[in-house]
Image (cartoon, helix red, strand yellow):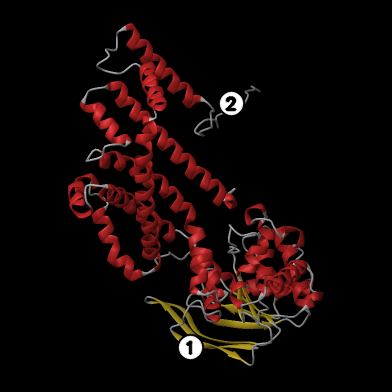
Amino acid sequence: MDLSLNKITHRYGDMLVLDDISLNIPDGEILCVIGPSGCGKSTLLRMIGGLERPDQGQVTQVGEVPQGCLNPLTFVFQDFALLPWRTVAGNISLVLEDHGLKGSEIDRIISDVLARTKLSDFRDALPRQLSGGMKQRVAIARALAVNPAVMLLDEPLSALDAQTRELLMDDLVGLWARQPFTGVYVTHNLAEAVRLGHRIAVLSRRPGCIREVIEIGRPLTERRTGDPELEALQKRLWDLMREEALAADQELLNV
Amino acid sequence: MSEQLVRFRGGGFRPEAKRGAGLVVFVLLLLVIEWGTRAGWISNLTLPRPSDVGATLAGLAQSGMLWTHLVPSLTRLVVGAALGISVGIGVGVMIGLFSYVRAGLVPLVAAMFPIPKIALLPLFVIWFGIDEGSKYALIALGTFTPTVVSTYGAVDNVDRGLIRMGQSFNLSWWSIVRKIVLPGALPGILSGLRVSLAIGIILLVAAEMLGAEYGIGAYILQAGSLYDLERLFAGVVILSALGVLISWIVGQMEKRLLVWRG
């Protein structure tokens, strides 16, 4: 299933936040969206996932939803959004309970996604007992459980420290390599973008519009941190964004 | 080069649990009163002797009158509070969930909250009769308003991110309410329960002051009109104990239901 964004425009009050954004997200590919803070990239993601309504323009699903998919557009949030009163397994079963699945089937899915995210030993732990990285793994496991057609990742690693981020990036690449998923990955971290994106869409400062879409040819599994080609690309992205990031930083927030 | 140790200046301003301190203060206070009443610098018109109050309580328990008074009081409290709290939680959740209910009922609840419910007692007697009905109604109304306010506050405070998450996974409206909103509001609802139940005890006494033969409130009122300080204080001790007991029960519920908070 592909996604297609057609001329998305959005205002908060009088302020234009997204201006005429058109994008294609082909099946099996990860699109990273980067841009300075406040450029509306998270808003754009929520619109793709149907959590917010754009003033103009629309998001279209092109093609059939794959078989066995319980929730085509599935989010992974920056703050994990785990229910603190449910165990790891309970948090995953939460998103399966509404689909009329049998208990044994739910159990099978939970065991499967926990194994894929290396969480099998933490099945009965409560979120407060887990580190930030583990919590985000649980959230990723939960997203995998509904077998999504498209994963919408909203700065999933931004609340984590640098080392954990590195580990989770490897995990995400591993998950993708085992079973390629379509993804939209919003981040302000350029290193994440060049590691995980097949294409990178650079948004400009408010009002957000697409400045450039960059393709990276190298397969995800062959990318390493410190790779000179990726570093050069990262520098090029930074040059593109630097001034806007500076301006965005010095903007008064009168909203 | 002069040397100086860096002075520690980071202490204090951090309440610590000191076990038994409360008990010591309580016992000391009783001892001082006991001493004062025996020595005569507290006249027995001012305060009763604690040992006499104790003896009165013991006598009350032995004669079986304690239960004669306690059972109707507890029944009134349980029935009235159960009514008020369950309706209060229901209405509070509705206010939290539906904008129209909120717009319609919040002003009404705000108008009802500050009314001293005791002032309505004569009205309740006409509406519900002088028997148990008016007492249940008074306690129910008294516990209803604080429960509503704390419940809709608790529902408002449920993390919107979690609700957004539920929507993003296509959970049904009812699933979101049952699995996200209600458990998320539970801590706030339980802490509101403490306040509501304390108000319930206060109103219990008020209700029993009007046309009740038995009950802790009636007992206290009788003792008061006879200026029988020992019995008056014995009644007050029973009420305090009731308050402590209820607070303990709510504490246990919090411990059981909110394990996930750690």
Q: Chain of mark 2?
A: B
Is A193 rendered above or below residue B28? below
User: Residue B65 sits in which quadrant?
Assistant: top left
Quarter of the picture containing the C terminus of chain A is bottom left
Amino acid under disc 1: Gly
Q: Residue furthest front?
A: B63
| Amino acid beneath label 2 | Arg
Picture quarter containing residue B127? Answer: bottom left
What residue would you read off at disc 1?
Answer: A57
Determine whether the residue tagged by mark 1 lies in a helix, strand or loop: strand
Q: Is residue A248 visible?
A: no
Residue A109: percent from left, percent from top = 72, 72
Residue with the mark numbered 2: B7
Q: Residues within 10 Å of mark 2 (few under 14, many from 20)?
A: few
Q: Which mark is residue A77?
A: none
| A240 on left or right of A58 | right
Q: Residue at x 54, y 65 (%)?
A: B179
The crowd level at tag 1 (other Cα within 10 Å; few <14, some 14-19, many 20+) is some
Q: CA distance from mark 2 to mark 1?
A: 65 Å
